[in-house]
Image (spheres, grey):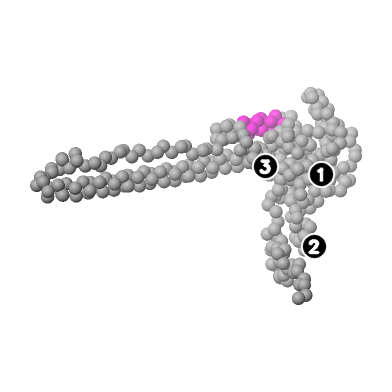
C-alpha cells in the first residue's frame, strides 16, 4: 500500500474557511478580538545607559526642573507586547489601527509604542525620577491624549509641572502607584490593583467565605441530626428486644413486669450526642491590615497632590479622578508568606 500524505491542516486549530466568511462577520470577529485595556509600562530612553544621579536636595530638584540641556531627540520605549491583532493580516491590522496608534515620540523622533489612549493606562514608573528625562516631558505632545496616567508619587512633580503646556485636561484618572521600586520593567508586569477595587474584592471574598462557613454549619447540623436519629433507632431496637424477652419470661414464670421495671431492665443506654467541634474556616490574611494600608496610601497621595498644587502653576479645568494602586502579589509569594 502506498504511503499516505498526512493532512497538514489536521489538528492545527485553524479555521481554514475563515476567509470565506462575509467581510461584515470577519470585521466583527476582529473587533471582538481587540485586547482588554492594558497597562503600558513606559521606560526611559536612557534605560541601560548611565543614569543621572537623583536630586538629593530641594535646591537640586528646583534646578533640575529648568535644566533643558538635553537636546538629543530620542523616544520613549516600552517592553509591553503590542496587540497581536496588528500582526495577523492586513484586514485585522486595518481594524486594530482604529484603536491603536504609534505614539509618545519625542519631537523630531519616531514613535515606537502602540497605545489605545481611550482605554490603556500609561505607567512611566521610575522614569519620573530620572533627571535626564526632564526635557522629555515637555517634548512629548502625545501626552495630551492620555486618559489614564499611572505615576509614582515621588516623581509626580516632574509630570504635573508640564500640565498647562501639554494641555493634560483630557486626563480622566490619575493613579498613584506604590511599591514599584523592585519591578523589572523589561519583563511583563503583574496586574495593577487599585485600592478601591482591592477593598471591594476583599468584601466579596469575605462574603463568599461567610457563605461557605454557613453552608458548613448547616452540613454540621444535619450530621448531628442524623447521629441523633441513628441513636434513637438503636434505642428503639434494644427496647423492642427487651420487651420480647420479658414477654417470654411472663409466659414461663407467670410474672408481669411493670413499666418502671422495664426501664430498669432495659440494657439500652443513651449517650448524649455532642456534635464534634468544627474548626474555624481558614480566613485569608488581610482585612484590617490591608484596609489600613490602602487608607494610608490614599491619604499620602492626597497630601502629595495638595502640596504639588500649591507649588506648581497647575489649574484643573476638570479635575480627574484620583486613586492609589499597588501591583498584585503573585499567588506563590502570598502562599509563602502565609
Q: Is residue 166 magenta?
A: no
Element at label 1: strand
Residue matched to label 3 = 192
Q: Residues within 10 Å of mark 3 (few under 14, many from 20)?
A: some
Q: Is residue 304 magenta?
A: yes
Residue occupying the far left of the picture: 254
Q: Is residue 151 left or right of residue 218?
A: right
Q: Residues within 10 Å of mark 1 (few under 14, many from 20)?
A: some
Q: Is residue 29 above or below residue 76?
A: below
> Mark 2 or mark 3: which comes first in sequence?
2
Which span is picked out in magenta?
Answer: 296-308
Residue displayed at 72% across by 63% down: 12
> Mark 2 or mark 1: which comes first in sequence?
1
Spatial separation of the CA atoms under disc 2 and disc 1: 25 Å
Spatial separation of the CA atoms under disc 2 and disc 3: 32 Å
Residue matched to label 1 = 77
**Which numbered tag is attached to residue 90?**
2
**Residue 99, percent across and down?**
74, 55
Amino acid at each position: 500500500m502506498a504511503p499516505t500524505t498526512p493532512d497538514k491542516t489536521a489538528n492545527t486549530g485553524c479555521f481554514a474557511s475563515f476567509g470565506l466568511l462575509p467581510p461584515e462577520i470577519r470585521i466583527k470577529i476582529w473587533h471582538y478580538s481587540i485586547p482588554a485595556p492594558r497597562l503600558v509600562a513606559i521606560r526611559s530612553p536612557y534605560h541601560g545607559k548611565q543614569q543621572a544621579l537623583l536630586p538629593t536636595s530641594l535646591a537640586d530638584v528646583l534646578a533640575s526642573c529648568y535644566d533643558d540641556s538635553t537636546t538629543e531627540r530620542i523616544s520613549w520605549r516600552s517592553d509591553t507586547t503590542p496587540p497581536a491583532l496588528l500582526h495577523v493580516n492586513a484586514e485585522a491590522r486595518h481594524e486594530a489601527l482604529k484603536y491603536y496608534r504609534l505614539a509618545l515620540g519625542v519631537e523630531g523622533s519616531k514613535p515606537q509604542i502602540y497605545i489605545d489612549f481611550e482605554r490603556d493606562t500609561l505607567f512611566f514608573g521610575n522614569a519620573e525620577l530620572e533627571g535626564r528625562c526632564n526635557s522629555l516631558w515637555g517634548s512629548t505632545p502625545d501626552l495630551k491624549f492620555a486618559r489614564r496616567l499611572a505615576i509614582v508619587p515621588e516623581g509626580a512633580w516632574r509630570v504635573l509641572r508640564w500640565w498647562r503646556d501639554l494641555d493634560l485636561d483630557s486626563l480622566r484618572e490619575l493613579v498613584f502607584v506604590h511599591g514599584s521600586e523592585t519591578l523589572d520593567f523589561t519583563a511583563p508586569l503583574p496586574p495593577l490593583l487599585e485600592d478601591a477595587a482591592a477593598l471591594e474584592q476583599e468584601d466579596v471574598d469575605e462574603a463568599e467565605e461567610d457563605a461557605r462557613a454557613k453552608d458548613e454549619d448547616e452540613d454540621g447540623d444535619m450530621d448531628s441530626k442524623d447521629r441523633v436519629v441513628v441513636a434513637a433507632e438503636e434505642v428503639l431496637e434494644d427496647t423492642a428486644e427487651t420487651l420480647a424477652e420479658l414477654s417470654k419470661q411472663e409466659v414461663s414464670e407467670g410474672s408481669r413486669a411493670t413499666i418502671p421495671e422495664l426501664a430498669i431492665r432495659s440494657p439500652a443506654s443513651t449517650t448524649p450526642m455532642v456534635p464534634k467541634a468544627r474548626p474555624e474556616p481558614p480566613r485569608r490574611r488581610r482585612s484590617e491590615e490591608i484596609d489600613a494600608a490602602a487608607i494610608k496610601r490614599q491619604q499620602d497621595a492626597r497630601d502629595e497632590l495638595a502640596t504639588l498644587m500649591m507649588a506648581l502653576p497647575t489649574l484643573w479645568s476638570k479635575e480627574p479622578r484620583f486613586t492609589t494602586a499597588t501591583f498584585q502579589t503573585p499567588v506563590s509569594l502570598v502562599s509563602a508568606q502565609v
